[in-house]
Amino acid sequence: QQPVQSPQAVILREGEDAVINCSSSKALYSVHWYRQKHGEAPVFLMILLKGGEQKGHDKISASFNEKKQQSSLYLTASQLSYSGTYFCGTVRSNFGNEKLTFGTGTRLTIIP
Amino acid sequence: KAGVTQTPRYLIKTRGQQVTLSCSPISGHRSVSWYQQTPGQGLQFLFEYFSETQRNKGNFPGRFSGRQFSNSRSEMNVSTLELGDSALYLCASSLALAGGLHNEQFFGPGTRLTVL
């Protein structure tokens, strides 16, 4: 089952904050976040494992609420370089044969 | 360390033909996953190989197949091409261990397949 991302697209001015949500109808073991710039390959941002931890680096952080099967990506004081499409990916268990299923993405545009 | 490489980068085929795409993972990575990317559909999982074994397969018809060699290089094959197969095909490698895909995936630049 593909996770659902919201919003589908968002436009921000430089310096504004953004939140991207990712939800699943199934229990999750891990949530992955990637960013893809136009014409480039997706690049890893972070992984959150079951346990409700929050992670972050620089001004990008994420949380994982395993009870609600939801994850949120927080971008604070956005920079022009944050523009791109953000994908969340989910893995349902710790078994070796579980696949990483991505959402349809959230397109983030930062304008000066 | 060299990144993930994919060949060819661009491919134009006609309906009914078959195609083979190649992916060379980062040295030491034993897991290779394949994804199809089309506008509006995001990244659709095709399959994942770990140590030459297919560990998982997405919801694609049997025309899509793959394999992994002992050096971890992987190929995917699409037979009897259809117009709807036009897409960017991405492969990703990771240090994924037997416990599954809980590590960072490194994506290659992709192969852009156009079916006419």
Image: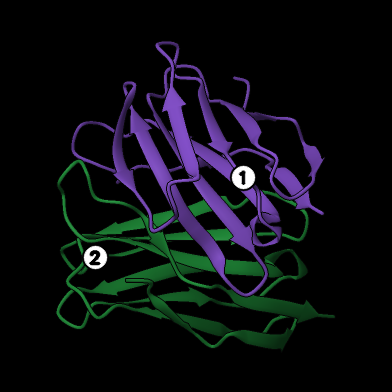
The chain that hosts pointer 1 is B
Q: Colour of chain B?
A: purple
Q: Which residue is mark 1?
A: B80
Residue occupying the point 30% across, 59% down: A48
Chain for disc number 2: A
Chain colored green: A
Q: Residue at x 38, y 39 (%)?
A: B48
Helix, strand or loop at mark 2: loop
Determine crowd level at label 1: few under 14, some 14-19, many 20+ residues with C-alpha closer than 10 A.
few
Where is residue A54, by image quadrant? bottom left
Q: Quadrant of residue A71?
A: bottom left
Q: In the figure, is residue A65 to the left or right of B4?
A: left
Residues at marks 2 and 1, common chain?
no
The front one of A21 and B23 is B23
Q: Quadrant of the N terminus of chain A?
A: bottom left
Question: What is the distance, in whole Å, between disc 2 and disc 1 at their CAs?
Answer: 46 Å
Q: Is residue A59 visible?
A: no
Against A84, residue A10 (above or below) is below
With A99 as the anchor, is B11 left or right in this view?
Answer: right
The C terminus of chain A is located in which quarter?
bottom right
Left or right placement of residue B44 versus residue B40 in this view: left
Q: Position of residue B86 (x, y in %)?
A: 71, 56
Q: Residue A53: which numbered mark, if any?
A: 2
Q: Residue flagged by tag 2: what amino acid is it?
A: Glu
Front residue of A46 and B107: B107
Residue B21 coordinates in the image, percent (x, y)? 63, 32
Number of numbered tags placed on the structure image: 2
- Tell us which disc is closer to us: 2 or 1: 1
Placement of B94 over or under A21, stated as above or below: above
Camera-nearest residue between A64 and B29 = B29
Residue type at mark 1? Thr
Q: Residues within 10 Å of mark 2 (few under 14, many from 20)?
A: few
